[in-house]
Image: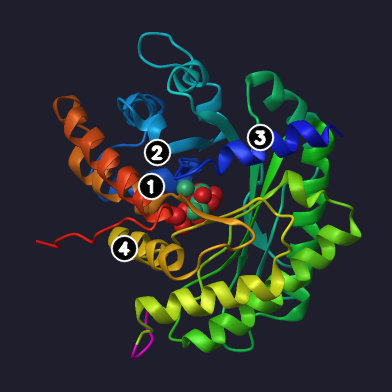
Amino acid sequence: MDLDNLAAVAQAMVADNKGLLAADESTGTITKRFDTINVESTEDSRRDYRELLFRAAGIGEYISGVILYDETIRQSAADGTRFVDLMAKQGIIPGIKVDAGAKPLAGSDNETVTEGLDGLRDRVKEYVDLGAKFAKWRAVIKIGDEMPTGYAIHANAHALARYAKICQEGGLVPIVEPEVLMDGDHDIHNCQMITEETLNCVFGELYAQEVALEGMILKPNMVISGLDAKNRADFNKVADETVAALMRCVPAAVPGIMFLSGGQSEIDATMHLNVMNTNYKNLPWKLSYSYGRALQASALKAWLGDSGKVKLAQGALMLRASLNSAACAAEYKGESTQ
Ligand code: 5MM
């Protein structure tokens, strides 16, 4: 394992005021996103949409890396330029989702375990040859009646660590993504307890499986009220509880924490990141973003599958990326919702 190289890539991913664009929607998920704008999901429409994201002029100023899906890392733009080469021109590091999705967990009615370990070593080799420098694996933890079970947390943490070790051995920086979902009416305290239990279990497994913390990135949920909760916690409370949970559970050797947005609105995701970086200086790790929906939602709405609206959509993406970059620097000034 070349730890110096892994650590250098991880540091580049959390370069000052930069974050990641999560564009690794599997075909089912991107189809759902396209359904909301009445665009048919085909190989070409997915290519056109991703091309507009990666070609947005100057996006590399705010985005250090893009997480790709298997189809996308093999695709080329309409003019034949490989997507990974387009990214290189923008100074963007290509990454790849390597998990095979959250699948039903044996012996549990409603919980999942993320699959994809079989054959992973060979797939890592292939992705390195295709130009990937980092990888991503997302585990899903649900809060609900008698959920999560310790069993589900442990099964997912064990798989995350196995994935991370295989990636590091093969030369990819693993993004470790244990997502405690926002779905439900639970309060922020409940989310904080489950997030801490999950992170403690994940870091226990990473330690047991000898994953080098300097050569990985953590992509967690923020500690936040459930989407259907009464009296949802405000921005300051989310920032306080999130930083407290991370301080309790995440070793200082981890270079960066790049949050998922998890269903927050674009503005909420930017605000929360800004408040954390404003109220908490000198944390042991960088706090940045690896947003999917919170970077793409308005770009997708602006595009509508219309080639005449590519510039509009790129403008919407650039706006979100620049505002999240400002939030990394604690310089986001808020925005009108009109
Ligand atoms: C972009 O969506 C990613 C892929 O999801 P599926 O495997 O379900 O298709 C997802 O893992 C994403 O990278 C993270 O959840 C962060 O995205 P959000 O939208 O939560 O910021």
Numbered tag placed on residue 9 in the rendering: 3
- Nearer-N-terminus badge (4/3): 3
- Nearer-N-terminus badge (1/3): 3
Asked whether residue 300 is drawn in magenta, I would say: no
Q: Do the CB atoms of the residues marked 3 and 2 lie less than 8 Å apart?
A: no
Asked whether residue 230 is drawn in magenta, I would say: yes
- The amino acid type found where label 2 is placed reads Tyr
- The amino acid type found where label 1 is placed reads Ser
Q: Is 61 drawn above or below residue 90 in the view shown? A: below
Rendered residue at 50%/36% (across/down) = 66
Number of the front mark, 4 or 2: 2
In x, y percent, where is residue 188? 48, 84
Q: Is 5 drawn above or below residue 193 in the view shown? A: above
- Nearer-N-terminus badge (4/2): 2
Rendered residue at 17%/34% (across/down) = 312
Question: Is label 4 within 8 A of ligand 1 (CB to nearest ligand atom)?
Answer: no
Q: Which residues are magenta?
A: 227-231
- Within 10 Å of disc 3 (Cα), the crowding (few <14, some 14-19, many 20+) is some
Separation of marks 1 and 2 at Cα, in angstroms = 6 Å
Q: Is 234 drawn above or below residue 257 in the view shown? A: below
- Which residue carries the number 1 mark? 325
- The amino acid type found where label 4 is placed reads Ser
Rendered residue at 31%/28% (across/down) = 56
- Nearer-N-terminus badge (3/2): 3
- Which residue carries the number 2 mark? 62
Separation of marks 4 and 1 at Cα, in angstroms = 16 Å
